[in-house]
Image (cartoon, coloured by chain):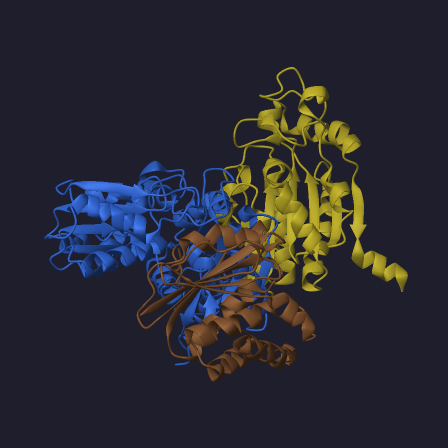
């Protein structure tokens, strides 16, 4: 019998600690499918954050460095600069990337650091139990916004792709989601494009993935996908905010 | 070997390049900026990487990233900047990563002054970040010794898989002295058994990590590390004993303040006062045995620092408080003069006998 | 024997450079030496000074508190350091700028209008070298060959034209009265 669907080789055969319905599993799979397709797992260095995906070093089959909270882009910079022929990517959540690590995120963009960032936006700090993230939606209830995020006192959500798209060193800034099969296919294409950009030395590629956190949202996996679709996507429109390769192609 | 004349900061940079440091990540801060500037000029030409980071925090984490892949990496800063690096240093200690961190100390706390100080002794030797760990701390006292220490620091960092700090100060960083450099190092230690540099599908993946959620497992990790610390304590202490033979008063001082103290001791000896100088070259591990040797005839210890008195606690611990120990120091960036130290010597000894 | 020197003046008068030349003289003469600048905001327009120690022995404190030799190129520097000079010390001032009168009688005090002499000889900005030349003639610390070698070692090739200008100023200084 022919096997038509299998675990990517780059994804190690271990059970993850992720909650049922969590989006991390899907995104891990997409990243590893791309690494498989490109045949680069032996030449890849992953950098994982602090947060729910901290233990991804046990799941990704490449060599992995665990970074301090928010510092994955700086760690990846160090690794890539001394290993320009390796593929280097970070995998970060929204608290890590868009709050404590904002400076590092912005500056890998300004420098056009030739790395890939996979950015998981699930509007919450998952690992610590569901506090307000920089991406928490206005009015959204979290442990630290028990009456809903009040933008007068807690500020507004941050739209990372839009912000980074203004930086000259950014090659790709694209927002995707995992709430449906077509969106997942789109997400994989974006991730592939990001890694292709690195091979072509185009600069920083960031793929923001709108993902789920059923446990902390207090929703079923199904309803969580609805939340992405109905609450998140309207606030965080999907699409390509910057694509240097496409711009160059169009200019030809 | 030809002597050249160089600022301490520049000599540190040149020495690092010569012993195979492949990358430098820094952020401007007085009084260490010449080190970064020198690296910017020289590093790329020698096939390495120079990068001015967006912050001290980013710089130390770039070092973490580069060191994780097995290359020799370095960063430098001055006191306020080193505080920002504390997080990264703790993570590196927890991940067993070798790297060299240079602190060209200035007056504190806070933004403090930009003049030379030694008030980061506690930070460097006792609490360079959260958690159960040590780093090796060297305290050179001349431009030549800074050069020699850089080589030693990289070697020991690799040997014991630990971050190593060179604790200098604004005086040592800014001054010029004649210096000779070793020949560039061509053979570097092999780190392929742990480095995260791509496994080429030929081995299991390597993980560089300081997280161990299983408490007994973390305890085991820490215990293993402390076995290494024990070896460091046994093998790596170093100190200079100057005129300690028959010395009834021994001054304890390191780095710049040891130079000031040395001038005072020389003057005292020329006048028949039995004074000596004990100068630790390693601050962690503190040279306990060497201090015992230096103070075997001592009736009194005078600890001299450019701080309010930090190393003095290690001096008292090392001697188990058996020898009366007095402190003299200036702080905030003020450098004590040999005359001030000499006056203290006279006060304590009652002058020549 | 150790000679401790303080050079002091405005930023831009070549104070640190003069100290460097003396340090390089020490290097060329095979001596132990140290050069320590004041640093920070001072060097960006305010007062500048540096300590130079030349010795046959390893240098202890590189920070000079009581100099054997003081070269003062402005009033504030003169006032700051004059009382610190060791008895029997040597003090040189640029009388084109320093208006203060020396009240000490236990030192050798040499006052020359170095800035004016430099201007008369068409070498503005060389007052430092004139003072250094005079100081070397007076103290015998280094001979002219050593100074020449120091200049050649210290000044980068692309600015080699400065060597002759500086040496000329040193000679004018050494012959000045």
* Above or below B222: residue B187: below
Colour of the chain lettered A: yellow
Res. B234 visible in picture: yes
Residue at screen point 54% across, 81% down: C152
* The quarter of the displayed image where residue A152 is located: top right
The one nearer the camera, B328 or B199, is: B328
Residue B277, how many percent across, how many down?
Answer: 23, 56
Left or right of B66 in this view: A237: right
Left or right of B319 in this view: C145: right
Residue B297, how many percent across, how many down?
Answer: 10, 53
Q: Residue furthest top?
A: A147
Residue B292, how many percent across, how many down?
Answer: 15, 52
Tell me how many marks there are.
0
The one nearer the camera, B138 or A154, is: B138
Residue at screen point 68% across, 70% down: C119
Q: Residue furthest bottom?
A: C145
Res. A82 visible in picture: no
Q: Which chain is blue?
A: B
Left or right of A186 in this view: B327: left
* Above or below C156: residue B343: above
Which quarter of the rendered picture does the N terminus of chain B lie within? Answer: bottom left
Residue B121, how many percent across, how many down?
Answer: 35, 45
Q: Which chain is brown?
A: C
The one nearer the camera, B285 or A6, is: B285
Left or right of B238 in this view: A190: right
The one nearer the camera, B117 or B196, is: B117
């Amino acid at each position: 019998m022919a096997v038509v669907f299998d675990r990517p080789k780059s994804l190690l055969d271990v059970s993850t600690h992720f909650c049922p319905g969590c989006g991390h599993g899907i995104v891990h799979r997409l990243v590893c499918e791309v690494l498989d397709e490109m045949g680069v797992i032996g030449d890849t260095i992953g950098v994982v954050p602090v947060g729910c995906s901290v233990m991804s070093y046990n799941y990704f089959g490449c060599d992995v460095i665990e970074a301090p909270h928010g510092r994955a882009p700086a760690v990846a910079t160090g690794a890539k600069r001394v290993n320009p022929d390796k593929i280097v990517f970070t995998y970060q959540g929204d608290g890590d990337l868009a709050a404590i690590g904002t400076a590092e995120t912005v500056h890998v963009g300004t420098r056009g650091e030739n790395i890939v960032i996979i950015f998981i936006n699930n509007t919450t700090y998952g690992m610590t139990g569901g506090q307000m993230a920089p991406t928490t939606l206005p009015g959204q209830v979290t442990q630290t916004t028990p009456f809903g995020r009040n933008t007068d006192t807690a500020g507004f959500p941050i739209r990372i792709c839009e912000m980074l798209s203004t930086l000259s060193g950014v090659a790709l800034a694209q927002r995707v989601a995992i709430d449906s099969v077509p969106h997942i296919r789109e997400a994989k294409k974006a991730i592939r494009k990001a890694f292709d950009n690195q091979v072509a030395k185009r600069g920083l590629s960031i793929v923001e993935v709108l993902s789920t956190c059923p446990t902390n949202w207090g929703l079923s996996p199904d309803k969580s996908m609805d939340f992405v679709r109905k609450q998140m996507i309207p606030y965080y429109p999907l699409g390509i905010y910057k694509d240097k390769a496409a711009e160059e192609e169009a200019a030809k | 070997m030809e002597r050249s004349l160089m600022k301490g900061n520049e000599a540190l940079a040149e020495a690092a390049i010569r012993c195979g440091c492949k990358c430098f990540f820094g952020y401007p801060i007085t009084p260490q900026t010449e080190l970064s500037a020198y690296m910017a000029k020289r590093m790329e030409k020698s096939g390495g990487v120079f990068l001015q980071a967006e912050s001290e925090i980013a710089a130390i984490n770039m070092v973490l990233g580069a060191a994780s892949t097995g290359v020799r990496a370095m960063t430098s800063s001055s006191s306020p900047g080193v505080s920002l690096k504390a997080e990264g240093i703790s993570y590196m200690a927890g991940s067993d990563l070798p790297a060299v961190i240079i602190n060209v100390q200035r007056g504190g706390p806070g933004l403090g002054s930009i003049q030379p100080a030694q008030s980061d002794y506690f930070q460097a030797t006792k609490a360079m970040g959260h958690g159960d760990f040590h780093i090796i701390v060297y305290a050179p006292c001349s431009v030549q010794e800074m050069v020699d220490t850089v080589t030693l620091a990289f070697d020991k960092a690799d040997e014991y898989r630990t971050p190593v700090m060179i604790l200098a100060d604004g005086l040592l960083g800014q001054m010029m002295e004649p210096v000779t450099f070793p020949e560039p190092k061509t053979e570097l230690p092999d780190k392929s058994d742990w480095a995260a540099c791509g496994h080429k599908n030929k081995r299991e993946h390597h993980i560089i990590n300081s997280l161990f959620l299983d408490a007994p497992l973390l305890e085991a990790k820490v215990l293993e590390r402390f076995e290494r610390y024990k070896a460091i304590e046994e093998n790596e202490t170093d100190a200079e004993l100057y005129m300690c033979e028959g010395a009834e008063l021994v001054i304890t001082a390191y780095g710049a303040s040891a130079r000031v103290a040395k001038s005072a001791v020389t003057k005292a000896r020329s006048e028949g006062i039995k004074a000596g100088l004990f100068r630790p070259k390693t601050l962690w591990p503190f040279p306990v045995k060497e201090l015992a040797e230096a103070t075997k005839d001592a009736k009194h210890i005078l600890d001299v620092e450019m701080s309010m008195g930090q190393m003095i606690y290690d001096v008292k611990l090392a001697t188990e408080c058996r020898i009366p120990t007095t402190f003299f120091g200036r702080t905030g960036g003020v450098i004590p003069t040999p005359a001030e130290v000499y006056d203290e010597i006279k006060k304590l000894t009652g002058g020549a006998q | 024997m150790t000679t401790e020197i303080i050079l002091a003046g405005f930023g831009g008068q070549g104070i640190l450079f003069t100290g460097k030349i003396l340090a390089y003289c020490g290097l060329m003469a095979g001596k132990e030496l140290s050069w320590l600048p004041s640093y920070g905001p001072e060097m960006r327009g305010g007062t500048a000074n540096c300590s130079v120690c030349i010795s046959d022995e390893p240098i202890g404190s590189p920070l000079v508190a009581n100099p054997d030799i003081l070269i003062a190129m402005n009033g504030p520097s003169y006032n700051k350091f004059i009382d610190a000079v060791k008895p029997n010390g040597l003090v040189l001032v640029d009388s084109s700028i320093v208006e203060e009168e020396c009240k000490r009688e236990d030192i050798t005090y040499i006052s020359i209008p170095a800035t004016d002499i430099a201007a008369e000889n068409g070498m503005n900005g060389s007052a430092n070298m004139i003072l250094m030349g005079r100081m070397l003639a007076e103290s015998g610390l280094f001979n002219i060959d050593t100074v020449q070698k120091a200049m050649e070692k210290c000044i980068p090739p692309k600015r080699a034209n400065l060597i002759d200008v500086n040496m000329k100023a040193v000679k004018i200084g050494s012959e000045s009265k």
